[in-house]
Amino acid sequence: MSESTDTQLTRDTYDRLQAELVDLTTRGRVEIAALIETARALGDLKENGDYHAAKDSQGKMESRIRMLERMLKNATIADGSAPADGKVGPGSVVTLRYEGDDVDDTTDFFVGSIEERPGDLTVVSPGSPLGSALLGHAEGETVEYAAPGGNLRVDIVKIGA
């Protein structure tokens, strides 16, 4: 995620991520430090699996802390509801069919941040080529976007929230 990329988050998600950041930087760091100290007391660090596991956990936690700090610093608060005008916007769940696919061969996408994702839907960032092509379009429309393999066309089959 680049430093200048704004992430749109609902107030609830922003608050949840802020609370997670506080928890990781306080309780999380204290717990990991205690685990590392306990593992260190077991002896030789070269062959100490507990120590290496604790250090690995510490690295993953610190990575999550840095990611949350960047995301929250650049976040903009959105209302969290899909546009009422029936067009694709942040928060929309969109059913798409790629040009040339069978009528029943569709894929559902969530337009927004992965932190906002409902269930296990594939996330499309509003700033991505597909996401920006979809924004503002309605059911039944076809949009084209530049993909790494060339231009692709997709039909918007359905828009939900």
Image: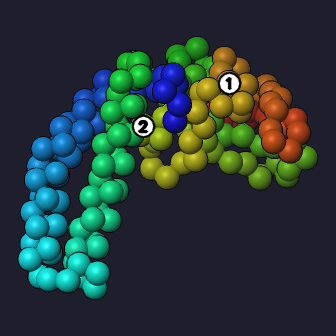
Location of residue 129 by image quarter: top right
Name the side, left or right, on which 18 lies relative to 143: left
Visual colour scheme: rainbow
Q: Is residue 156 above or below residue 6?
A: below
Q: Residue flagged by tag 1: what amino acid is it?
A: Ser
Residue receiving disc 2? 116
In the rendered image, residue 53, in percent from the top left (x then y), is placed at 28, 72
In the rendered image, residue 29, in percent from the top left (x then y), is placed at 16, 51
Q: Closest to the observer: 144 or 82?
A: 144
Name the side, left or right, on which 115 lies relative to 91: left
The residue at 90%/46% (across/down) is 100
Q: Residues within 10 Å of mark 1 (few under 14, many from 20)?
A: some
Q: Is residue 86 above or below residue 62?
A: above
Q: CA distance from mark 1 to mark 2?
A: 18 Å
Specify whether residue 82 is in view: no
Q: Closest to the observer: 32 or 153?
A: 32
Residue receiving disc 1? 132
Q: Residue flagged by tag 2: what amino acid is it?
A: Glu
Labels in figure, total: 2
The residue at 59%/27% (across/down) is 126
- N-terminal of the two: label 1 or label 2? 2
